[in-house]
Amino acid sequence: MSRPRFEVAEVVRRYGPAFLKGQGAAVPCQHRRVLRDIERCRTAVLGGHVDACDRCGARQISYNSCRNRHCPKCQSLAKAKWLEARLDELLPVEYFHVVFTLPGEVARIARCNQRLIYNLLFRATAETLRTIAADPKHLGAEIGFLAILHSWGQTLSFHPHLHCVVPAGGFDRDRSRWVGCRPGFFLPVRVLSRLFRRRFLEALEREHRRGELLLKGPLEELEQAEVFQRWLQNQRRTEWVVYAKKPFAGPEKVLDYLGRYTHRIAISNHRLTAIQDGKVSFRWRDYRCKSRQRTMTLAAGEFLRRFLMHVLPPGFVRIRYFGLLAHRHRKSNLELARKLLQAPTPTDAEEAAPTDCKTLYEKLTGRDPTVCPQCRKGRLVRCEGLAAEPANLPILD
């Protein structure tokens, strides 16, 4: 993929200081740290090293990455490493993609309670899928799946939802037989939607009784128990969106899908089309009009505000595993699943897939990073280290 013409880092450099000055203390330290890291990524501030060709003598400077998970330039290798580790976890069955979405009124509460609401979203989703799947009227099996949190829409709006990737089947009650789904069908989405809504709202009501919800501004009236109960009743009458896409065309397509979703951030550099006159333009896909591509232009401050809405709480885990794929017993469960499916066990070569940066870079780009880009014949050899420079960044003032 070619280098993007515009970058989020450029928006931060040009307009970040003015944005922070205007917002003042309303910008949390975590958000300031993300802006700082994006601005410094792959610049002399973070240091780096110099490589020289052992044939023509050409020199090349490489600066260090910030490795912030919200940085548009730091996700490719992290994603490749994660995907390599998933190769030996795929089963020879259909895989379904199920999405659980919070409605707009609940998303308003999530804005002020991200860690709490996101955890409730994971928990309600896991309980819903496992309960319905275990019901003999539907599948009657113990399933496993991974769930990936996304909080954005195409226009950087706040839109919390979970993408779940689910193998089509699971263990029976005695764990002696693999129970498969009907071809092309996983579980009834309306049943999933109703139970998901009930489980989530019950958990939200408990948190409200404990006084754990932060409700401020237009939501302040929900502090009152009577008002909150009326709000809950309205949500119980609303249809919540749960949908299941067509199954993937084989386990190998699952990795293609995961590569697009697992390490995605709110917006990539390649979607930016212009940065000028205090405004930022970017492409977005209008799913209401047959996925037609459109262009949106926002004031730089509004663009940064929307981007920062999707910064995760510190230490928050956005990719989680449940059921038979949960971390503690995943290896033994996968071995049992392969035995029941009469599927071959991954070879030692597959289990020991290379994860060094050079190999992954070559796999991603098709280029050997050690070959000199000038003469195309020599090898680049590190000859000098570059120390990180003292950061003189008003963005943290």
Image (cartoon, rainbow, N blue to C red):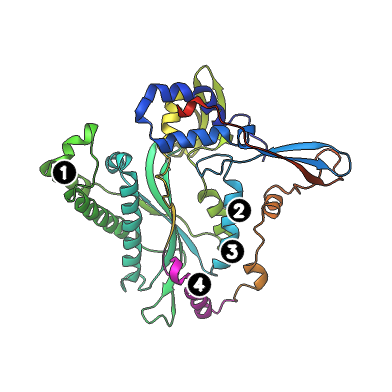
The image's mark for residue 331 is: 4
Q: Which residues are magenta?
A: 322-344
Looking at this rendering, what residue extends furthest in the right direction? 55
User: Which tag, 3 or 4, sits closer to the chain's start?
Assistant: 3
How far apart are the two marked residues, 3 and 4, measured between alpha carbons?
Answer: 13 Å
Q: Position of residue 180 (x, y in %)?
A: 44, 72
Whole-angstrom CA distance, mark 1 to mark 4, is: 44 Å
Res 288 → quadrant: top left
Q: Residue at x 41, y 46 (%)?
A: 314
- Amino acid under disc 2: Ala
Q: Earlier in the sequence, mark 4 or mark 2?
A: 2
Contact, mark 2 vs mark 1 (Cβ under 8 Å): no
Is residue 6 in sight in this rendering? yes
**Left or right relative to 353: residue 215:** left
Res. 250 in view: no
Density class for disc 4 (Cα within 10 Å; few <14, some 14-19, many ≥20) is some
Element on which disc 4 rests: helix
Residue type of the residue flagged with mark 1: Phe
Q: Are marks 3 and 4 in contact (CB under 8 Å)?
A: no
- Residue of label 3: 87
Q: Amino acid at mark 4?
A: Lys
Measured as percent of width and height from the top left, residue 2 is found at 68, 37
Q: Is residue 68 left or right of residue 192?
A: right
Which percent across, then down, holds residue 259?
Answer: 56, 52
Q: CA distance from mark 3 to mark 1?
A: 46 Å
Q: Nearer the viewer, residue 339 or 265?
A: 265
- According to the image, label 1 marks what residue? 228
Give residue 307's quadrant in the image.
top left
Q: Secondary structure at mark 1?
A: helix
Select label 3 or label 4 by which is in front.
4
